[in-house]
Amino acid sequence: MSAQLKVYNSLTRQKEIFKPINEGAIGMYVCGPTVYSDVHLGNCRTFVSFDVIYRYLLHLGYKVRYVRNITDVGHLEGDADTGAEDKISKKAKLEQLEPMEVVQKYMNGFHDMMAVFNTLKPSIEPRATGHIVEQIEMVQSIIDNGFAYEKNGSVYFDTVKLAKEGDYGKLSGRVIEELLVETRDLKNQDEKRHPSDFAIWIKAAPEHLMHWNSPWSVGFPGWHLECSAMSTKYLGNNFDIHGGGNDLKFPHHENEIAQNYGSCNCQPANYWLHTNMLLMNGKKMSKSIDPETGISNSIAPGELFTGDNPNISKGYSPMVVRFFMLQSHYSSTLDLTDAALSAAEKAYRRLMEGNKVLQELSPTGKESAGDLDKEINDLIDLAFAEMSDDFNAPKALARLFELVPKINGLKAGHLAFDQIAVSTIERLKTTFNTFIFDIFGLKDDTIAGGGDGEYETLDGLMQMVIKIRQNARQNKDWGTADTIRDTLKALKLQLKDGKEGTEWSKE
RNA sequence: GGUCGGGUGGCCGAGUGGCUAGGCAGUGGUCUGCAAAACCUCGUACAGCGGUUCGAAUCCGCUUCCGACCUCCA
């Protein structure tokens, strides 16, 4: 049905044919959030992007083990040598909470947001604090292999040694001589042999809240270490896909590769996938206030839904936002603007309405396949082929939009069913459902409620109102007919008068 | 300063050597009591300058602007 899967590999900087290590099964690791504050909207884009990738791999029939971690320790602000603080410890002090309360609070918020965006849960969601033993073991094996050294209770990765063996900087395109020249003067550099060396175990300062015993000191693991340790534990020394945001390429992912090489002389992932940034009004989101406008160029996911933010004119539903994200490729920057969201909202509704019409079509007449039949089948084939070409959701989506006029044309009678095989209509129905719900992970929030028969109740009411209005129209009582229509419009319920009667939909 | 990625029609956004992206907005029409929706129709864009080529938005060079990373950051 679909062509060979191709992915753009950041490691080789080219599109490659995807071959899993074990046929039919895929191991995928995606760097999850550091749970020290509310989840960033840009973060949501990354996880939505990988959700679509995950869903498509499942659609292709792969058995996928999707591991996405929760960083709940070790992510420092500032440099480790200059008395930097762990983000979670810092927040805990600020909010006068236990570090684990901070973690739980923001992890809950993160999970809620992922559910709102309708992302599938990962197969395993390991936490750094739950894998201290594995991390200590990894530090030890890196030391044993001569790729790390201990100094005053902290352990540093020896990037110079790795660079001599020719691999440090491969992913990010950096070379160590440049790092040496460019790294700005760091204070208290004495513990490190080289500025580009990084801590894999950090001796805890007395006031540091989170710490564990280790052969080197009472301390805590370096941030990059958790991903190496946990990906190895759950996916093995060598697995298929490693993903994350673009900004994690250096130093985080580069250092992950270094650690895996140092501990087992192996390359963790065969394919590295990176998502690009979400901009707002053409710029990076920033909480600082613009002195001219008095507003900040940032928005929280919650504000996006309620419209409670000066950068947007109204609220947009989570599915509209998800649809908006699908319209661009995961590896491109995406510019969030009010106009773009508003356009996405209309397009999303058009797609959903189109699908509703499609699912209600019942083919009539002959079933001799004609040009239209071929056209429809070609578009379906194209959509899947494009999705297999580095998960090109925007292209596949465009194909669906090319099919929508055909669907509406069939319903309205502009296009004839005798041009299309009955099996093609069935294939079209399946394709739309597969793409919209299974692969793109959208939900139809254009209908009321969802559960508890709420829709049925509303539909019953609407049918009654439509009947009353129909009587008024037959009596040419346009005033009453228009009043009903306008009143419903104000309630975001739209009436559509067609040849076969009147239909309604929720805006 | 270094590394990397970009600048596509009014807006968002695909596209990498010749073939309609798509959505929104806009144009003209069909339908309709009117409207909305839907359908049909139109729009000929690729930062600038030079080069390669029969042919470039797509390749190369220069200029310019923007973004990411190099320090925590999706």
Image (spheres, rainbow, N blue to C red):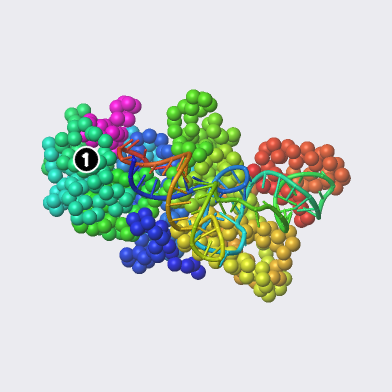
Q: Is residue A129 left or right of residue A332?
A: left
- In the image, residue A167 sits, relative to residue A280, either above or below, namely below
Quadrant of the rendered image containing residue A400: bottom right
Q: Give the residue drawn at x 41%, y 60%.
A: A15
Quadrant the C terminus of chain A occupies: top right
Q: Which residues are magenta?
A: A75-101
- In the image, residue B17 sits, relative to residue A189, either above or below, namely below
- In the image, residue B68 sits, relative to residue A438, either above or below, namely above
Q: Residue A76 colored magenta? A: yes
Residue A417 image offset from top left, x and y in percent: 70, 68
Residue A112 image offset from top left, x and y in percent: 44, 41
Residue B73 image offset from top left, x and y in percent: 36, 40
Quadrant of the rendered image containing residue A426: bottom right
The answer to which of B28 and A359 lies nearer the viewer is B28
Give the residue number, with chain letter if any, for mark 1: A195
Amino acid carrying label 1: it is: Pro
Return the chain for callout 1: A
Q: Give the residue drawn at x 48%, y 30%.
A: A296
- Rate crowding at label 1 as few (under 14), some (14 to 19) or many (20 or more) other CA atoms within 10 Å: many
The answer to which of A95 and B44 lies nearer the viewer is B44
